[in-house]
Structures are given as C-alpha cells and as structure tokens.
C-alpha cells in the first residue's frame, strides 16, 4: 500500500518517483544575503537592502516584476527591487488600525505576519493583531478585505468583511483566486471566495490532533501557521503546535504527510511521515516539486520532502554564523519563518531571529 507521502507526491506530479529508493538528494544550497544587517530596526529606505535594518521579518512574497515583499514587525511592508533597493509600500510604523481608503504608506498596521500578491498585482496582508486581511491596490490605496477587527467567534457564508478573524497569520491563493487564511487563534483555515464570501475549509475550532482521513472541517488543528497550495489543488498546512504538516485534498479530506507529533528535528534520510519536526512554520513547493518546510524551533532548519518521499535538511542545523557563500546546512539559523521561490530557482528565506532575508542558491553537484 502506498504511503500518504507517496500519494501526495503523485498528486503534485511525481507519481513515477514515489518509491523510497528512486531519488537522489539534491546538493545543499549556499547562502546569499538579500536584506538586513542583523540589527533590528527600521532604516535604509531608498538604499541597498543589505545595508537596511529589518525588524523580525515574517512572511515574504515576490510580485510579477520580481520585487520581494516582506511583512516586517516594525508594522510595515517593505519592498526590495531586483536591483536591491529597499522601500516601504505599506504601514507608517505606528501600531494600530487606520488609513483604509487612503495611501497605504500612511496607514497603520499592527503586527503584519503574512503577505502575498494576487493576480491583479494587489498586495494582501495578514494584519494579525488588527484581526483583518488588508489589500494594497496597485495604485497604493489600502482597504480591508476580511475581518471586523474583533477576534471572537467565526461566521461562514457571509461577507468576509463582516466575519471575525482571530489572529490571521498566513495567506495563500488557490487556483480560483480564493484567499486562504491560516487563522491561528481560532485554529481554522478560512477561504474568501472571489465574490467576498467566507467559509471554513479545515479545522473544527478545537485544539489537538485528530481527524485524519475525515472531512477537514471535522479535524482539530493546534497552531496553523503555514499554507501552500499544490498544482493539483491540495491545501497544505503547517501546524506549528502539532509538529506536523497536513494536507487537505480536493475532496476536502485531511491527511498527515509529515511529522509524528514530537518536537524535534530527526529522521533525515527516512520517510517524512515518520520524521520529527520542530515547530513547522511555513511551506512552499519548489521548482523541483519538493515540499519545503521551515522549522522555527530550536534547531532552526529548512527541511525538504524529496522526490522519493524522504525528508532531508537543506538549510540550518549547523553552527556557523550565516554568511555569503556558506553551505546552507553549515549555518545556524535563528527562527526561519517564511519562504518564497525567487525567479532564478532560489528560495528567499525570512530569518526572524537575525532580522534578515537570505537567498538559498541552488547547490551544484
């Protein structure tokens, strides 16, 4: 009988490679600094991003022009152009809620943790402590697209702007243009349809780990913090509190594909379903269709589920201070939290504890 990991690999286009001995581990990437001096703060707009200060960067995204967007806990969204210049595109730096209908750079954000770019070029922000999802139009105007500003309870089937959200943390887009929201406080995954209607696609509001092979809305989550969507329409969830990665298939059934519930980083070279994860925080599927998982726990790693279903560490877990050209597995990473693929085959990694962005450059054999 195939494992759930093998089934997942088949669904993302790896059916011919879903046997444990069929794949080779890719060479480990090297590090290249993209932004941040390592000192927490807010400085450097208009200059080179490597000389700028960031403050606990969380989510990252890339737009159609190749600009990198960063959700920064200085209550701003920063932008880094392909030539390395950093600016601010949303947030005044004052924690609060104000500014809807006006310029995003004059608006107040409160602990923004997630950022994505929609098909129209709008910037969607998980404004966590405002209990809202906000959108910056291409013309720079900011509005609210989900959430009332209150955390209590939840409502399905109505306008997203009339629904309460409890600590929206991470965002993703599905193939239909729906906005997926990891609602950490209520332990739910919500979806906002293109027409603005909100629903729940995973989680029953309870806490814990149960529900595998049942409808996802009958399953319990503990601390969902990461989301990704595969080409086949699977919704992948990093449950930081349960130390697992779970998958909601297109029929709405939930499965576990990585992690056994123990908070540790072990099992490299073996099946992902038997490995341990340490606080998985974010997810992405790379160009090779590997599933990458950041671990924000004490080990500070990026793990990959390889072509044959095996799990390996591709960054972090080392003892060396991160530096340009360093083998990524030799580096000590302090709280890797967000990832996004860049346009050259690399992975942009937000390292919250060191207040920096690093690019994982593909390794050579």
Image: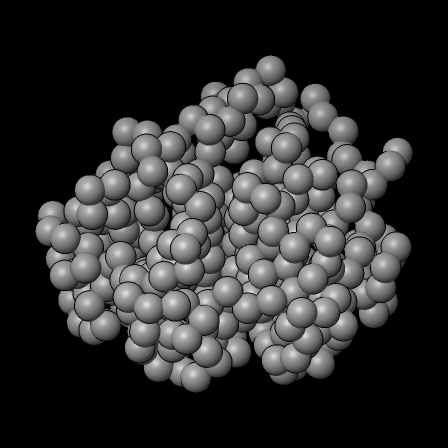
Residue 217: tell me if it is visible: no
Left or right for 214, reference 95: left
Relative placement, left or right, of 217 versus 18 is left
Residue 134 in picture, x, y percent from top left: 34, 61
- The answer to which image quadrant residue 149 occupies is bottom left
Q: Quadrant of the C terminus?
A: top right
Q: Quadrant of residue 51?
A: bottom right
The residue lying furthest to the top in this view is 16
For residue 271, above or below residue 99: above
Residue 349 drawn at (x, y percent):
65, 56
Q: What x and y, as percent, mark residue 356?
A: 68, 68
Identify which residue is drawn at 65% across, 30% down: 288
Q: Residue at x 87, y 37 (%)?
A: 364
Q: Residue at x 76, y 29 (%)?
A: 24
Residue at x-position 23% and y-position 63%: 147
Residue 95: horizontal and vertical position, in percent? Answer: 40, 83
Q: Which of the 4 image quadrants contains residue 110?
A: bottom left
Front residue (pair 44, 160): 44
- The answer to which of 140 and 125 lies nearer the viewer is 140
In the figure, 177 relative to 169: above or below?
above
Number of labels in the image equals: 0
- Chosen colour scheme: one colour
Position of residue 185 in the picture relative to residue 268 (left or right): left
Asked if residue 37 shows in the view, the reply is yes
């Amino acid at each position: 009988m195939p494992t759930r990991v093998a089934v997942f690999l088949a669904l993302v286009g790896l059916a011919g490679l879903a046997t444990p001995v069929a794949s080779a581990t890719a060479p480990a990437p090297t590090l290249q600094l993209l932004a941040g001096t390592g000192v927490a703060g807010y400085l450097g707009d208009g200059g080179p991003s490597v000389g700028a200060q960031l403050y606990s960067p969380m989510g990252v995204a890339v737009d159609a022009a190749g600009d990198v967007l960063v959700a920064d806990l200085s209550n701003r969204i920063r932008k880094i152009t392909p030539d390395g210049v950093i600016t601010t595109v949303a947030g005044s730096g004052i924690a609060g809620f104000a500014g809807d209908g006006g310029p995003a750079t004059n608006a107040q954000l409160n602990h923004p943790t997630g950022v994505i770019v929609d098909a129209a070029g709008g910037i969607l922000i998980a404004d966590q402590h405002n209990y809202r999802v906000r959108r910056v139009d291409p013309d720079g105007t900011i509005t609210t697209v989900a959430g009332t500003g209150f955390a209590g309870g939840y409502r399905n089937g109505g306008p997203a702007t009339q629904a309460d959200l409890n600590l929206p943390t991470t965002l993703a887009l599905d193939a239909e243009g729906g906005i997926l929201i990891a609602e950490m406080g209520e332990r739910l995954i919500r979806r906002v349809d293109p027409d603005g209607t909100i629903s729940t696609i995973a989680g029953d509001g309870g806490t814990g780990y149960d529900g595998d092979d049942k409808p996802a809305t009958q399953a319990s989550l503990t601390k969902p913090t990461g989301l990704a969507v595969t080409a086949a329409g699977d919704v992948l969830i990093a449950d930081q509190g349960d130390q697992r990665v779970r998958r909601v298939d297109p029929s709405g059934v939930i499965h576990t594909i990585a992690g056994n519930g123990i908070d540790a980083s072990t099992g490299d070279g073996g099946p992902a379903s038997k490995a341990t994860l340490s606080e998985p925080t974010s997810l992405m599927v790379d160009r090779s269709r590997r599933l990458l998982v950041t671990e924000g726990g004490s080990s500070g790693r990026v793990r990959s589920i390889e072509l044959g279903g095996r799990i390996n560490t591709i960054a972090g877990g080392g003892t060396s201070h991160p530096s340009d050209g360093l083998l990524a597995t030799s580096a000590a990473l302090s709280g890797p939290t967000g990832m996004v693929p860049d346009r050259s085959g690399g992975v942009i990694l937000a390292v919250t504890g060191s207040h920096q962005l690093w690019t994982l450059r593909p390794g050579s054999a």
